[in-house]
Amino acid sequence: MKFANFLRCLFLSVGIVILIFWREQELNFYKTVIFIHQQKFDEYFKEQQNPTCPGLNESDWEIYKDLTTPNIPIVLAEERLKLTWKDMGLVTFTSKTHMREAIANCASIRAHPQLSSLPFTVFFSNDINETHSVQYQKECPHAKTEMFPFEQFPDSVKRLDHYRFKAIHHSMAFKNHKILLSFDSSILFNKNANFSDLIESSIKGNPTDVSLLTPANHNMFSTTHPKMYDCFPNIKPEYMLKVPQFQSGLILWIGSEMGWKAMKRFVECSLQPTCISPPGATIKCNIQRIYKNQRVFSGCHRFDQAAINLILYENSNHKPELYQRRSPWFKVSRKP
């Protein structure tokens, strides 16, 4: 009996020692993770020492890291040339005001033989109620709908007129696809559009792996707030006088290292205090001033549109002809 008790005490003691050991190992692991995390943020912070364009604080940096960490492997060079339209996902965002446009947009997708079979994610603004949601799902049953999680992001993202949310919802979808077609709900697709050719030509002709597909019909200079260049110190404003601006409402993303390089910068700019939205920037302006004299800033800032154009201008080594790809297969249809 005494020997049995001795063994029980021995095993219990050994068990306690093992538990203490593993607990210490677990704590050491978490300490290491926290240390590495802090080290990476410190490295980022040092790299972003630009007094005219503040970088991300630590909490926003954590959001940025989560948004720009893919859920699937990055497309490698040997796979890139083999991608087809079947590797593509679709994403859009809509609000109560744009519900009619969104329904028409979905109808054009359902009428397209390629797009109708692809995964389609629709983010709803927080003004969409159950009635709107049911109506949309009735008209667009194949779409995966979800409320955009504004509560998870800084207050600045909640200002819809600054368009910070666009890069974020693009990234949320891009994490799950090798190719992503992101578009505004006002885009209509021609049922004869050949996405096989579009993807092949974009991959072969555009090393940035991000293609803007619809022109804005004015240059970059007239609709880019002068203070935005503080966040793009390698670009002189006068360069933008002769560079066309393309719309951000229709973008083809390839999930390669280059595609993610652009997405990371797009998300970062959207979360930075003054990158996508410099002090004084507004969309409320006299639109005619954009076209009257494109050698001066019109007062009309194009937030996310200016950002993605500047990012790709940098990534292409100042060659907009690489990422600006006019296509006849799409049109914008605004519905009041």
Image (cartoon, helix red, strand yellow):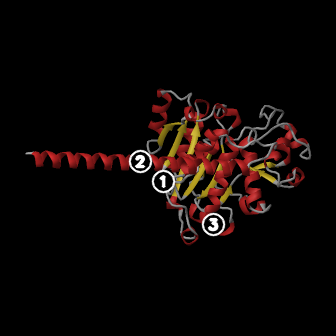
The mark lying in front, picked from 3 and 1, is: 3
Q: Check disc 1 and give the amino acid type.
A: Leu
Viewer-nearest residue: 46 or 173: 46
Q: Type of residue at label 2?
A: Glu
Above or below residue 285? Residue 82 is below
Q: Secondary structure at mark 1?
A: loop
Reply above or below: 327 against 107. Answer: below
Residue tagged 2: 24
Nearer to us of marks 3 and 2 is 2
Q: Nearer the viewer, residue 132 or 40?
A: 40
Q: Quadrant of residue 82?
A: bottom right
Q: Nearer the viewer, residue 13 or 192?
A: 13
Q: Is residue 146 left or right of residue 286?
A: left
Which mark, by number, is residue 118?
A: 1
Going 58% across and 58% down the picture, which residue do you hit? 192
Distance between the Cα atoms at labels 3 and 2? 50 Å
Q: Residue at x 55, y 52 (%)?
A: 69
**Quadrant where the N terminus is found in the figure:** top left
The residue carrying mark 3 is 203
Could you tell me residue 124's position as x and y percent?
54, 35
Mark 3: which amino acid?
Ile
Left or right: where does residue 206 sit relative to residue 174? Answer: right
Compare marks 3 and 1 and give the one earlier in the sequence. Answer: 1
Q: Earlier in the sequence, mark 3 or mark 2?
A: 2
**Local crowd at mark 3 within 10 Å, few (<14), some, or many (≥20)?**
many
Return the disc, 1 or 2, that comes first in the chain's sequence. 2
Relative image position of residue 274 (x, y in whole percent) = 76, 39
Q: Secondary structure at mark 2?
A: helix
